[in-house]
Amino acid sequence: MTDVAWIDAALTAARPQALGALLRYFRDLDTAEEAYQNACLRALKNWPENGPPRDPAAWLIMVGRNAALDEVRRRSKQQELPDDDVISDLGDAESEVAERLDGSHYRDDILRLLFICCHPDLPATQQIALALRIVSGLTVKQIARAFLVSEAAMEQRITRAKAAVAKAGVAFETPGAVERSERLGVVAAMIYLIFNEGYSASGDTSEIRAPLCEEAIRLARLLLRLFQNEPEIMGLTALLLLQHARAPARFDSCGAIILMDDQDRGLWNRKMIAEGTALIDKAMRHRRAGPYQVQAAIAALHASAPKPEDTDWRQIDLLYATLEQLQPSPVVTLNRSVAVSKVEGPEAALALIAPLEQRLSSYFHFFGVKGAFLMQLGRNDEARSAFDRAIALAHTTAEAAHIRMHLDQLMKDGAPRTRAAE
């Protein structure tokens, strides 16, 4: 690994801890971020010449803090700015800081940083943007590109989020046990939303949005290190790994969607699947089922089937029934209908989703699934109507092209089988 590559990896890994500690010290998000950036600039100059520090996070915290204090002194003109070699000469200070950065400091600083990004006053879009900017260190340009908006619009979104946090008067003390419990679910949901932003990308946007999936997995692993015995965080991490493992097989060379039954399973990332399966097995042993664990178990059943016909649809149906109890949602029931169609047939599946039509009247996938069931039953006119509605609601060209493929099939021979979602 080159010096530049090693430094980049070290700065990325140390960012949440270092920025969290600087935030605790200065109690201002902009000041902490600027201090960290200054420390990174010093690292890019110092580390290639002098070698890596024993603890990169401690080094960045100390240098960032000194740089921020010097900036305050410069602005207030309270005292003369020290020489650069004095600022950079850490001596034993790095070891002293490293000794204080035990597991408790590490956990609390990162939790505080995550909690601030997930402040309840912020809408989900601002939570995600702030987390990607502050915790992950993505540039405004990178985030804007991933969300398909202009840099100016994303800059405004992040600025508004920071202003809302400042206005809310966020407490910077160590989060208590009750707060940790209450906010942990919000942090997990934010990470899941980041993943979905990348996972839901179509073939024509997947290349620029796929990195969001990888960043969500990195954040989930970070959260898992903080809560090693929390089964729902295990479940979340497992779910993201199992879903992302299929990424190379989800689209063809033209960007068209490939349904799960038709995916080349040889392209699935077996190492990632093994890691996700091991995590969900460990989570289930805690006997405290939660929505992420159930979704991960469903994904694991799909991933473990060597061929589509080997999929344990009956068990998947039971798991979706459990998920309906834990997290009632028309979308969950819609997903369950695919399993029901495999176990009981398309008529039973159609009956299951019939009550959902009003609530999902603007949902592309509802009409795509409904059309597929109607095709299987030979009700072609109704299927065509459902597919037309789905095309009208499609958000991407890949979604529309996928439904048009069904319509073409309908014109040819009427009623192909219903398949699992991609």
Image (cartoon, grey):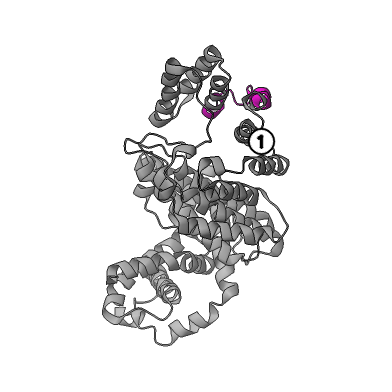
Is 122 part of what is drawn in magenta? Answer: no
Furthest toward the top, the residue is 381
19 displayed left or right of 353 = left
Location of residue 371 in the rendering, given as x and y in whole percent from the top left corner: 54, 22
Q: From where the camera sits, is residue 75 visible?
A: no
Residue plotted at (39% across, 26% down): 401
62 or 366: which is nearer to us? 366
Q: From where the camera sits, is residue 382 visible?
A: yes
Q: Which residue is mark 1?
A: 329
205 or 40: which is nearer to us? 205
* Majority SS type along the magenta span: helix
Location of residue 89 in the rendering, given as x and y in whole percent from the top left corner: 35, 83
Query: Which part of the image, by quadrant, shows the N terminus?
Result: bottom left
356 displayed left or right of 399 = right
Residue plotted at (52% across, 63% down): 222
145 or 116: which is nearer to us? 145
Residue plotted at (52% across, 41% down): 308
Amino acid type at circle 1 is Ser
Is disc 1 placed on a helix, strand or loop?
loop
Location of residue 329 in the rendering, given as x and y in whole percent from the top left corner: 66, 36
Q: Which residues are magenta?
A: 350-367
